[in-house]
Image (cartoon, rainbow, N blue to C red):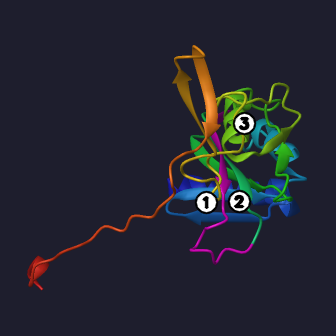
Amino acid sequence: MSVNLDTLAQQIGAILGDRVVSLKNALGELTLTVSAADYLAVATTLRDHPELKLEQLIDLCGVDYSDYGNGGYEGQRYAVVSHLLSVTHNWRLRLKVFATDDDFPCVASVTPVWSAANWFEREAFDMYGVIFDGHNDLRRILTDYGFIGHPMRKDFPVSGHVEMRYDAEQKRVVYQPVTIEPREITPRIIREDKYGGL
């Protein structure tokens, strides 16, 4: 498989040229990082160029890098990562793009390139708040329509902001502020002498 990845890496370098921000081959996987400005054009080239032919989008997800490397990460906070497959050439590629604005993360939608991106982009919008420019139906897909916030962001509270319950008197579901007190529980560990043969 490494011969395939080496061939793919050479093809990407020759075809995309300076649009490649980084191209890494690690742990038997090839990861291509491109800028947000080149994202849609690169995606189209990856699909249409006869020497690449990455015709299938397998997965697309959002990533929040705010605590990456135990807080030592310096760079853009939000990324969109896609996994692509070429049935023709039997190779895979991970495509990564970082949103340029952490306060309003936005990248181009790749639904015109791969229609399978539709629900994946809706999920990344719902969970991470990434806006996909050009997506024709960008709305929440996993949380309800009145939900506030994006639950997979690292700064979103584990207990959330509101809770819902059924009110028997009103005969409907009502939303109210969270009543659970946030707390951190550290388990108490008791070990015998010579635990684990030490």
Q: Indicate the secondary structure of the residue bearing disc 2.
A: helix
Nearer the observer, 145 or 124: 145
- Left or right for 24, reference 109: left
Instruction: Please give the residue where the numbered disc 3 appears in the rendered image.
Output: 121
Residue 169: which disc? none
Instruction: Report the Cα–Cα distance between label 2 and label 1.
Output: 6 Å
Instruction: Please give the residue where the numbered disc 1 appears in the rendered image.
Output: 6
Instruction: Please give the residue where the numbered disc 2 appears in the rendered image.
Output: 10
Is residue 58 part of the magenta span, yes or no?
Answer: yes
Name which residue type carries label 1: Asp
Instruction: Report the Cα–Cα distance between label 3 and label 1.
Output: 30 Å
- Residue at 62% x, 26% y: name it: 174
Instruction: Report the Cα–Cα distance between label 2 and label 3.
Output: 29 Å
Is residue 172 part of the magenta span, yes or no?
Answer: no
Residue 96, image x, y percentages: 71, 54
Magenta residues, as a range? 54-74
Sequence-wise, the earlier of marks 2 and 3 is 2
Residue 66, image x, y percentages: 67, 65
- Determine the image quadrant of residue 136: top right
Q: Is residue 29 above or below residue 86?
A: below
- Residue at 67% x, 74% y: name it: 73
Q: Is residue 190 above or below residue 38?
A: below
Judge the density around disc 3: few (<14), some (14-19), many (≥20) Cα neighbours within 10 Å: many
Q: Indicate the secondary structure of the residue bearing disc 3.
A: helix
Q: Is residue 193 above or below residue 156?
A: below
